[in-house]
Amino acid sequence: MASRLRRTLLAGLVTAAVAVPVSAAVRPSAVPAPPPAAVGTLTSAELPRLEDRFAANRDSIRAAARAAAAHGDRGRAATLREMAAGGGRFLTFDGRDGGRGAEVFGDLAAGPIPGGGYEVTALLPTEQQT
């Protein structure tokens, strides 16, 4: 009888040791967030207005932080507030689902962007293209 009780307790402890850490890592599947700011596509004519675009995306980040806080996801809300307060230069930001964005580091120069519909060879120096 005692060995059966020990096995039952051991099975319960093993189950708890596996289930508790895994369940703590689970995040809400859908944290609500507003749709991204309507900033349109980026063209070379818009380069002088980049600061307006960055400001609009920081506003989107703040709105996503408020939505995450209202949903009870304090960690996500704090991260988003930090992103917005840091003066980040975000070309795009979409807080829905897992969140996506593109931040500018350094100088933004016009040219082909990987994944922008160009072939890989377009990114090579001219003498290497065939």
Image (cartoon, helix red, strand yellow):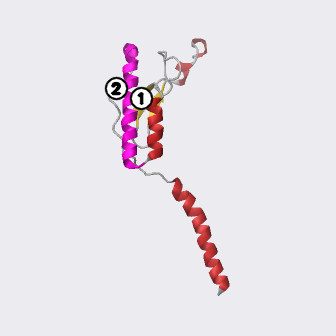
Q: Are marks 1 and 2 in contact (CB under 8 Å)?
A: yes
Label 1, residues with CA under 10 Å away: few <14, some 14-19, many ≥20: many
Q: Is residue 50 magenta?
A: yes
**Inter-mark Cα distance, 1 to 2:** 8 Å
Relative height, residue 27 to residue 19 (above, below): above
Give the mark, 1 or 2, whose residue is nearer the N terminus: 2
In the picture, the quarter occupied by the N terminus is: bottom right
Task: Give the residue type at disc 1.
Answer: Thr
Q: In the shown orientation, is residue 32 left or right of residue 106?
A: left
Splitting the image into 4 quarters, where does residue 91 fall?
top left
Q: Which of 5 and 92 is in front in this view?
A: 5
Q: Is mark 2 on a helix, strand or loop?
A: loop
Task: Give the residue type at disc 2.
Answer: Val
Q: In the shown orientation, is residue 128 left or right of residue 116?
A: right
Q: Please tell me which residue is depicted at 36% across the width and 20% down the height of the picture.
A: 52
Say which residue label 2 marks. Answer: 39
How would you classify the magenta stretch by its main secondary structure? Answer: helix
Label 2, residues with CA under 10 Å away: few <14, some 14-19, many ≥20: few
Q: Nearer the viewer, residue 74 or 4?
A: 74
Q: Can residue 71 be seen in this view?
A: yes
Q: What element carries label 1?
A: strand
In the picture, the quarter occupied by the C terminus is: top right
Relative height, residue 94 to residue 106 (above, below): below
Q: In the shown orientation, is residue 66 left or right of residue 115?
A: left
Rendered image: mark on residue 92: 1
Give, as a single range, the part of the protein colored magenta. 43-72
Q: Is residue 43 visible?
A: no
Q: Nearer the viewer, residue 110 or 5?
A: 5
Relative height, residue 2 to residue 76 (above, below): below
